[in-house]
């Protein structure tokens, strides 16, 4: 690829924007908004109302986007060597983006995210948003700096962050909610978070399997390098079966299921899940296709917040 002058401010700005992974940020933001203004508006709250204002939801979304962007940027800072092998078309650090720009941008975005979380905590009268935001910022830093090189720990940390998106919503509504609604928040959003974590774990393992060549050069001990692609495939298959069982039990318990036709309301993620199963049952697993199929499953699960019934 052509090497652009590092002195170009426009080059640095566009590079930082690309490294923040705006598509992933958009998916996370839409997830939060669809859960809050889609599915949650149909909950049977026994007369209690959801308290968080539109502006507070905007702040919460902004905190999540800023912290995720900061995490993506610092991850790119630490991944220069392997990215030049695994993703040469996206390896722009030290070519079009200066490393010191990444460090500065990471610190600014983190600070802004935590300051907004502080204001959000003050407005809600609860430390939960600030504590949760601080924990997310710390996990993202530790993941990039060292955890991603530890088999399963790095995968689990990113999967955990994915599962925290619905729990982030719960932390906003919980302080002012009556006891019966607090239980619903923990159960329903907790179940959603567990599902997202399980799917995220499979996706992270698939991405590590895709990146084995570059990770080996960088001497990173990821799970696929440690145990091999076949054991990784079997682990992903077990996790994917667990995803189906968790989802079925959650829908049965909290999904307002009265008859078999009611299941159709919750069936949007099934094509993505089925595609992943087909890919995982093949010994020569196409890891890139699996990563995309898990993302498709997540997106379908988000989209159905438009119509799934309340709890």
Image (tube, helix red, strand yellow):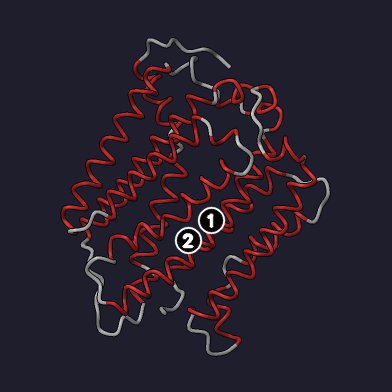
Q: Which one is in front, 196 or 179?
A: 179
Determine whether the residue tagged by mark 2 lies in a helix, strand or loop. Answer: helix
Label 1 crowd bin: few (<14), some (14–19), many (20+), radius 10 Å: many
Residue 307's x, y, as percent?
A: 45, 73
Q: CA distance from mark 1 to mark 2?
A: 6 Å
Taking the image as shown, residue 152 lies to the left or right of residue 188, namely right
Q: Is 83 positioned to the left or the right of 188 in the image?
A: right
Most extreme residue toward the bottom is 258
Please report contact status of discs 1 and 2: CB closer than 8 Å, yes or no.
yes
Note whether 304 is above or below 100 in the view shown.
below
Quadrant (top left, top right, bottom left, bottom right) of the C terminus = bottom left
**Image point (53%, 56%), residue name:** 197
* Residue in the foreground of this view, choosing between 77 and 299: 77
Relative to 52, does residue 141 appear above or below in the rendering? above
Left or right, 31 with reference to 236? left
Residue 205: % across, % down: 65, 45
Q: Which residue is mark 2?
A: 193
Q: Please state, as top left, top right, bottom left or bottom right, where the N terminus lies in the image.
A: top right
């Amino acid at each position: 690829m052509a090497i652009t002058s590092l002195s170009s401010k426009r080059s640095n700005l566009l590079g930082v924007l690309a490294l923040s992974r705006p598509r992933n940020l958009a998916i996370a933001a839409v997830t939060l908004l669809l859960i809050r203004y889609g599915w949650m508006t149909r909950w049977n709250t026994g007369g209690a109302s959801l308290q968080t204002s539109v502006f507070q939801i905007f702040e919460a979304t902004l905190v999540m986007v800023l912290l995720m962007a900061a995490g993506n940027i610092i991850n790119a800072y630490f991944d220069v060597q392997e990215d030049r092998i695994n993703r040469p078309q996206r390896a722009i650090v030290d070519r079009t983006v200066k490393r010191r720009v990444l460090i500065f941008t990471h610190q600014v975005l983190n600070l802004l995210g935590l300051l907004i979380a502080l204001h959000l905590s003050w407005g809600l009268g609860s430390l939960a948003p600030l504590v949760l935001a601080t924990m997310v910022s710390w996990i993202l830093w530790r993941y990039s700096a060292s955890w991603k090189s530890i088999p399963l720990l790095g995968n689990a940390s990113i999967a955990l962050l994915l599962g925290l998106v619905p729990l982030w919503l719960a932390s906003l509504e919980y302080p002012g909610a009556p006891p019966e609604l607090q239980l619903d928040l923990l159960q329903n959003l907790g179940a959603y978070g567990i599902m997202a974590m399980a799917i995220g774990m499979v996706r992270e393992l698939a991405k590590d399997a895709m990146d084995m060549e570059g990770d080996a050069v960088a001497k990173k001990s990821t799970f696929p390098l440690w145990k091999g692609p076949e054991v990784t495939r079997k682990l992903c298959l077990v996790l994917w079966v667990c995803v189906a069982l968790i989802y079925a039990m959650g829908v049965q318990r909290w999904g307002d299921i009265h008859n078999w036709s009611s299941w159709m309301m919750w069936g949007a993620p099934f094509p993505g899940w089925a595609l992943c199963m087909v890919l995982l049952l093949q010994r020569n697993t196409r890891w890139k296709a699996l990563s995309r199929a898990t993302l498709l499953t997540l997106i379908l699960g988000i989209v159905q917040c438009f119509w799934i019934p309340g709890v």
